[in-house]
Image (cartoon, grey):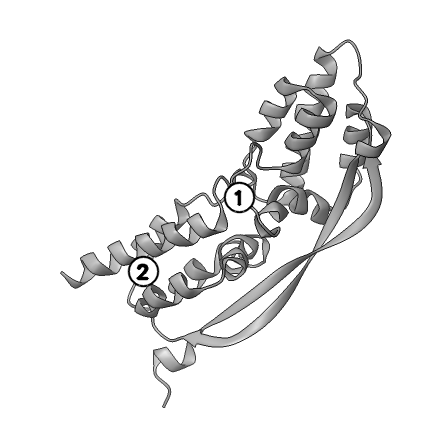
Amino acid sequence: MEDETTKNPFTIKDCALISLATGKKAQNLKELRAQLQIVDLSSVYFHFWGGLLRAGFEEREYHNDFAEWVRHEIQDDHLAERLAIIDPSDFADMEGLRHELIEVVEERLDEIEYITWARADRQFQFIRSQIVVFDTRKSITSPEDLLKAVPSMSTSAIFYHFIDARRRPPEGIDDFRAWLLRWEDGYDDLCDLLAEIDPYFMTLAKLREQISSLLAEYFGAKKK
């Protein structure tokens, strides 16, 4: 007869976010607003979260591509700052995030008298994303195993399990919490701590470090 650990394993997976051209572009704020209204939601996702998986990603001035483009190509510092503080983690879905983006751009259009154009070779190129998932052939069988597993996960595995999982039904939460909530022992307090981590304004390496530290503190206190 199977016990809880053998019938409830956590399968560790890895991923890559593939960039695909949409053919949609914008050279000014009116065009940006128009394209935001119709672009595939995977493009909104990519331009907020995709930067985390780009090779050589480090701390950058702005955490989403819209703010970056507005600052450097439209040269609108005021709007760039407004866009930069939008946290995608605050929205239940990408549609809500899209509406927020459109509203912020529309507010700025109402404020300005003249429309600034980016150079023709510096237009905003809308990219959509497609995630490719890999089986690492690794799994863990108890919550305590997360202590060793998380620090050794690749940053893209952290992205898959802690960030991308939030847009997957039915739970709409990270894979760690979704798994922990299935245990009869009760890890609600640990899940609450994980839920407090906002992954957006940090690198994936820092996110992995923060999750690892939280787990070490939690299970260390539990043993006392």
Mark 1 nearby-residue class (10 Å; few <14, some 14–19, many ≥20): few
Numbered disc 1: secondary structure: loop
Image coords of residue 150 (percent x, y) = 40, 62
Question: Compared to 144, does 87 lie above or below?
Answer: above
Q: Nearer the viewer, residue 174 or 72?
A: 72
Q: Tell me if label 2 and label 1 are in contact, CB under 8 Å.
A: no
Quadrant in which the C terminus is drawn: bottom left
Q: Residue at x 79, y 11 (%)?
A: 114
The answer to whether residue 9 is left or right of residue 97 is left
Q: Is residue 181 visible?
A: no
Which quadrant of the figure has residue 106?
Answer: top right
Q: Amino acid at mark 2?
A: Tyr
Q: Residue at x 69, y 18 (%)?
A: 108
Image coords of residue 128 (percent x, y) = 74, 49
Where does label 1 land, which residue? 58
- The total number of labels drawn is 2
Numbered disc 2: secondary structure: loop
Q: Residue at x 42, y 80 (%)?
A: 7
